[in-house]
Image (cartoon, rainbow, N blue to C red):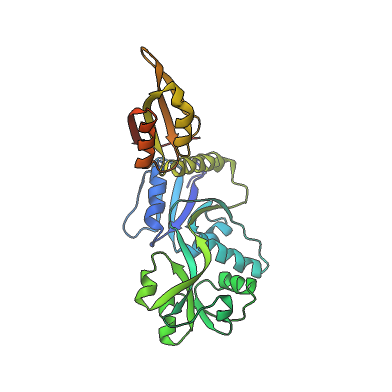
C-alpha cells in the first residue's frame, strides 16, 4: 500500500461456522461490495476502505487485542472466555463490546447424561466437567461454591462422557439436537450468548475514524429495521390516542389530513416490534381502514 493510499479498516469475522453467513449478510446490508475467492482468507471492499479477514472465531479477540484488526464480529461466549483468560494473566483486555447483534443466539449450558440425577449446582461437586470454555465455567462454579474438575477440550465435547473423559459437559447449545443425539440433557445455563461487535479501545487514526463511525451507524440502521414494519392506514381523528397505544414499539406517528375529510386522517408509523394479525384486527375494530404493513429496508435514527 502506497503512502498516499487511504488507510483501510480491518474487520475480523469467523472463517466458517454458525456466524459466517450472518456476518457477511450484515456487512452486505451495510452497503459493502466485495469479492472473495473460495479459499481466500481476506477480501477487499470495492466501495469502502474496509478489508475483511476470515479467521477462527477464538482468534478474533486476539486480532483486535493486538491492533491487527479495528473491529470484530464474534460470539459473546468467545469474548468472555478471552477476557477472563487475559485477566487471569494480569493483562488488560484491549477489546471492548460495542453492541450486541441480532443473530447467533445460543447458550453455554451444563448438560448431563441420561440417568444423571441433577438437583442444582451442588450436584456438580467432585465431578469432571468437559468444556471448551474453562474460564467461564470456573467463574460459574466459583459463584456457586462448587469444587469440580474442569477438563478442557478443543472440540467434540459432547462425546467426552461416553469416552470416559468426563462425567458431564458444559457446551454451546442452540436447538439441543446434538445433546439428544449423544444422550445428554441440558440442566443449567451458564451464559446466554449472541453475536457481538467488538472494537479496539486504542485511538483509531483520523484517516480511519470517519469510516469507522459511518460503519457503526450503518450497523445500527440494519439492526433497527430487523422486524420493523412501516404501517399506513386511514382512521377517525378521534381514534388517534387508541391507535398510538396499539402500534407496537412505534414513535409518535405521522398524521396527515385526507382530502375532503375533516373527520378522518392518514396515519404513518414505523413499528419496531412484530405486527400481529390481532393488532390489525384491533385497529380495524376502532375504525381503521386501508391498512398496509410494509417491510423496512434501511433506517437511520
Q: Is residue 295 visible?
A: no
Pinpoint residue 103: horizontal percent, then vertical percent: 43, 54
Residue at x 38% of width, y 33% of height:
283
Position of residue 184 relative to residue 240, above or below, is below
Compared to 116, does 252 lie above or below? above
- Report the residue at 35% width, 37% height from top: 281
Q: Residue at x 62, y 60 (%)?
A: 93
For this rendering, which residue is in front, 19 or 61?
19
Image quadrant of residue 32?
top left
**Residue 75 makes an appearance in the image:** yes
User: Residue 212 appears at what percent x and percent y?
Assistant: 53, 43
66 above or below 243?
below
Q: Is residue 64 above or below residue 91?
A: above
Please indicate whether residue 226 sits to the left or right of residue 89 in the image.
left
Residue at (59% x, 71% y) in the render: 140
Q: Position of residue 118 (x, y in %)?
A: 51, 78
Amino acid at each position: 500500500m502506497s503512502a498516499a493510499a487511504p488507510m483501510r479498516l480491518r474487520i475480523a469475522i469467523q472463517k466458517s461456522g454458525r456466524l459466517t453467513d450472518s456476518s457477511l449478510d450484515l456487512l452486505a446490508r451495510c452497503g459493502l461490495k466485495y469479492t472473495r475467492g473460495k479459499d481466500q482468507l481476506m477480501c477487499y471492499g470495492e466501495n469502502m476502505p474496509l478489508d475483511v479477514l476470515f479467521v477462527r472465531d477464538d482468534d478474533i479477540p486476539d486480532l483486535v487485542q493486538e491492533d491487527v484488526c479495528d473491529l470484530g464480529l464474534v460470539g459473546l461466549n468467545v469474548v468472555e472466555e478471552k477476557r477472563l483468560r487475559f485477566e487471569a494473566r494480569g493483562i488488560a483486555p484491549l477489546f471492548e463490546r460495542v453492541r450486541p447483534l441480532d443473530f447467533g443466539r445460543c447458550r453455554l449450558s451444563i448438560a448431563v447424561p441420561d440417568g444423571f440425577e441433577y438437583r442444582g449446582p451442588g450436584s456438580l461437586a467432585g465431578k469432571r466437567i468437559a468444556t471448551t470454555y474453562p474460564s467461564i465455567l470456573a467463574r460459574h462454579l466459583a459463584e456457586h461454591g462448587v469444587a469440580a474438575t474442569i477438563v478442557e477440550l478443543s472440540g467434540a465435547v459432547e462425546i467426552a462422557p461416553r469416552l470416559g473423559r468426563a462425567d458431564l459437559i458444559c457446551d454451546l447449545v442452540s436447538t439441543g439436537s446434538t445433546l439428544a443425539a449423544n444422550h445428554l440433557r441440558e440442566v443449567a445455563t451458564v451464559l446466554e450468548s449472541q453475536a457481538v461487535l467488538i472494537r479496539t479501545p486504542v485511538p483509531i487514526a483520523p484517516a480511519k475514524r470517519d469510516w469507522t463511525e459511518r460503519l457503526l451507524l450503518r450497523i445500527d440502521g440494519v439492526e433497527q429495521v430487523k422486524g420493523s414494519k412501516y404501517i399506513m392506514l386511514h382512521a377517525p381523528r378521534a381514534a388517534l390516542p387508541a391507535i398510538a397505544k396499539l402500534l407496537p414499539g412505534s414513535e409518535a406517528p405521522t398524521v396527515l389530513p385526507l382530502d375532503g375529510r375533516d373527520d378522518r386522517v392518514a396515519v404513518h408509523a414505523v413499528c419496531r416490534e412484530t405486527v400481529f394479525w390481532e393488532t390489525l384486527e384491533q385497529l380495524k375494530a376502532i375504525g381503521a381502514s386501508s391498512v398496509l404493513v410494509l417491510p423496512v429496508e434501511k433506517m437511520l435514527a
